[in-house]
Amino acid sequence: MGSMSTTKLKDLPPRLQDRYGYRRTSVVAIAVGVLLAIVVAGMGGWTAYRIGNPEVRWKLLAWEAVAPDHTSITFEVNKGARTSVECILRVQDKVRQDLGYAIVTVPPGTEYSQVTYEVATRALGFTAEVLDCATPGDLHAPTPQFPPGTENPPQPWRPS
């Protein structure tokens, strides 16, 4: 009986390796691949960190439809102490049309701020929310959605 050969391509002489298309992986190619993988992993980690730890964090704490002409909204903001932040507040009716819409500036000074703002409204509020808080110029929130023929009351609410 004949014996089976266990010769591998890498064990063949260079002339036969060329003939059968065997190429050694170059050290440079491996180094470039490893470096590229490290860069991609680093960018992914940095992006995940930024998403998980935004510069500005906010939370709606409470709201009360005090009267048909205003709603009181209390919210908190965590930010850098030297940073000024703008927040967009919105009060809507049962059919999700805006009754009041305000952009509130939280001044620099402390990292944590708790703000109560009186949003002037056209009718008794059904829901209130903080749409976004960000450094000036970085706000990303829906624009006011007032029914045709109506407009935002002057902000903030002031007693008559």
Image (cartoon, rainbow, N blue to C red):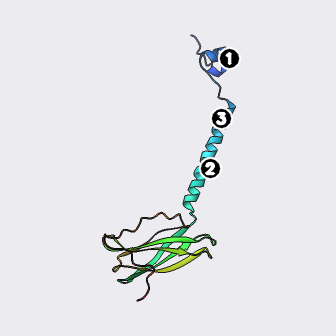
Q: Percent x, y for residue 138?
A: 53, 63
Residue occupying image coordinates x 39% and y 82%: 70
Q: Is residue 11 visible?
A: yes
Residue occupying image coordinates x 34% and y 80%: 124
Q: Residue furthest bottom?
A: 160
Type of the residue with mark 2? Gly
Q: Which residue is mark 1?
A: 14
Q: Quadrant of the C terminus?
A: bottom left
The quadrant in which residue 101 appears is: bottom left
Between disc 2 and disc 1, whose residue precedes? 1
Type of the residue with mark 1? Pro
Between disc 2 and disc 3, whose residue precedes? 3
Q: Residue furthest top?
A: 1
Local crowd size for mark 2, using a 10 Å CA cut-off: few (<14), some (14–19), many (≥20): few
135 up-or-down from 24: above or below: below
Q: Which residue is mark 3?
A: 30
Q: Nearer the viewer, residue 138 or 59?
A: 138
Q: Which residue is mark 2?
A: 42
Q: Which mark is residue 112?
A: none
Q: Assign a secondary structure to mark 1.
A: helix
